[in-house]
Image: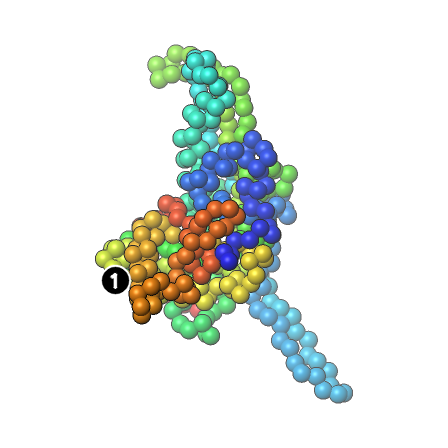
């Protein structure tokens, strides 16, 4: 059974019955993250304050006439911020007068703005960092920015313990992400009092200027998206970083081995599907190599037929859609993941 459940409504579910839902459906066609992402309302207007547990309390066996030592969990307070992304579409009123369906024409002509907005948001989920761009929000890569290459039993209790090293040391690296969506794991944020998702505002007919300074009339539409992101518990995500793209394309990187290592770092692999929405994100180059490596002999019986019990790539039905899965987890292809990532350093704790 695939690991994306229906217990939590996602971003698209929340907007399906509205005009904004149509826009989100269009965006999700090119940004598969929107098929999985969940949204939490900020608890401090445009900021979300939450506590990350960094250690468990100690426990002790009791004895008669003996007390039990006090203990408590250690936690860290984190404030995650939001930012707003906007796009403005202007369409000549004379073009709309020629259209059979003016509303549809406006949406079609707005598509390039929506696509640019979509690409920026998809990039932000993985790469934005408030340390360098404070007007944006903190994405995943800024949180999982070092790797740990030791055994699981001794991994550090920090996000680096969830990062697998793919071996690349140059500047042509990429990553694979296991992301668990949920209010206990990873979620997008929306400010208090602000509607969820993309908002569409018809600004009506306005006067604008062409390149020569001459006036003409347009119908203006403003698209806005106020959003942020938080990670409540880093153990529910895993990153395979430092995948050297050149080596991968030449066939010298074992993607299956890396997927297996990341899978066993993932806390949510042991949970029921209804309590989490787990997905794997990779770009098309990685997915193509993974597809090619799927003919590995471990997936095939000695008689030459496919071994359906092997933990390989399979086709599953997830919420009415046929998707490719790894160990029951849907694989999402996204162009937001670059082939030009810098190599991550080892964790120095």
* Residue found at x 59% / y 47%: 9
- Quadrant for the C terminus in the image: bottom left
Q: Is residue 17 above or below residue 315?
A: above
* Residue 216 appears in the figure: yes
Residue receiving disc 1:
252
Depth check: 144 or 100 in front? Answer: 100
- Color scheme of the displayed model: rainbow
Q: In this view, does 316 lie to the left or right of 271?
A: left
Q: In this view, does 56 lie above or below 342?
A: below
Measured as percent of width and height from the top left, residue 34 is found at 49, 44
* Residue found at x 46% / y 53%: 316
Residue that protrudes farthest toward the left in the picture: 250
Measured as percent of width and height from the top left, residue 257 is found at 35, 65
* Residue found at x 75% / y 87%: 64
Which of the 4 quarters of the picture holds residue 308? Answer: bottom left
Q: How many labels does the image show?
A: 1
Q: In this view, does 97 lie above or below 253?
A: above
- Secondary structure under tag 1 reads loop
Depth check: 5 or 133 in front? Answer: 5
Q: Is residue 273 left or right of residue 324?
A: right
Measured as percent of width and height from the top left, residue 283 is found at 36, 49
* Residue 96 appears in the figure: no
Residue that protrudes farthest toward the bottom in the picture: 64
- Crowd rating for badge 1 (residues with CA inside 10 Å; few <14, some 14–19, many 20+): few
* Residue found at x 52% / y 62%: 268
Depth check: 150 or 26 in front? Answer: 26
Measured as percent of width and height from the top left, residue 295 is found at 30, 61
């Amino acid at each position: 059974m695939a690991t994306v459940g229906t217990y939590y409504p996602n971003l698209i579910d929340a907007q399906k019955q509205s005009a904004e839902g149509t826009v989100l459906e269009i965006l999700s066609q090119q940004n598969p993250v929107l098929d999985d992402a969940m949204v939490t309302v900020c608890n401090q207007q445009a900021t979300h304050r939450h506590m990350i547990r960094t250690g468990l309390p100690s426990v002790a066996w009791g004895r008669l006439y003996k007390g039990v030592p006090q203990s408590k969990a250690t936690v860290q307070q984190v404030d995650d911020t939001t930012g707003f992304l906007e796009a403005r579409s202007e369409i000549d009123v004379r073009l709309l007068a020629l259209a059979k369906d003016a509303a549809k024409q406006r949406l079609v002509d707005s598509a390039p703005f929506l696509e640019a907005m979509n690409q920026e948001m998809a990039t932000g989920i993985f790469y934005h960092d408030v340390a360098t761009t404070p007007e944006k929000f903190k994405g995943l890569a800024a949180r999982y920015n070092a790797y740990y290459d030791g055994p699981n039993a001794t991994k550090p209790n920090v996000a680096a313990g969830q990062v697998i090293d793919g071996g690349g040391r140059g500047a042509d690296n990429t990553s694979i992400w296991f992301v668990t969506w949920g209010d206990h794991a990873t979620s997008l944020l929306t400010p208090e009092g602000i509607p969820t998702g993309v908002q569409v505002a018809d600004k009506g007919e306005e006067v604008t200027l062409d390149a020569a300074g001459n006036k003409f009339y347009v119908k203006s539409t403003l698209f806005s998206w106020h959003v942020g992101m938080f990670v409540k518990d880093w153990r529910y995500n895993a990153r395979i970083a430092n995948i050297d793209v050149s080596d991968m394309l030449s066939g010298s990187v074992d993607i299956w081995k890396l997927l297996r290592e990341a899978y066993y770092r993932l806390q949510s692999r042991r949970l029921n599907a209804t309590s989490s929405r787990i997905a794997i994100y990779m770009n098309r180059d990685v997915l193509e190599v993974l597809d090619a490596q799927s003919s590995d002999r471990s997936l095939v019986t000695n008689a030459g037929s496919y071994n359906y019990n092997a933990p390989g790539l399979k086709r599953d039905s997830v919420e009415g859609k046929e998707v490719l899965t790894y160990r029951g987890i849907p694989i999402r292809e996204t162009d937001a993941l670059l082939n030009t990532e810098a190599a991550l350093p080892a964790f120095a704790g």
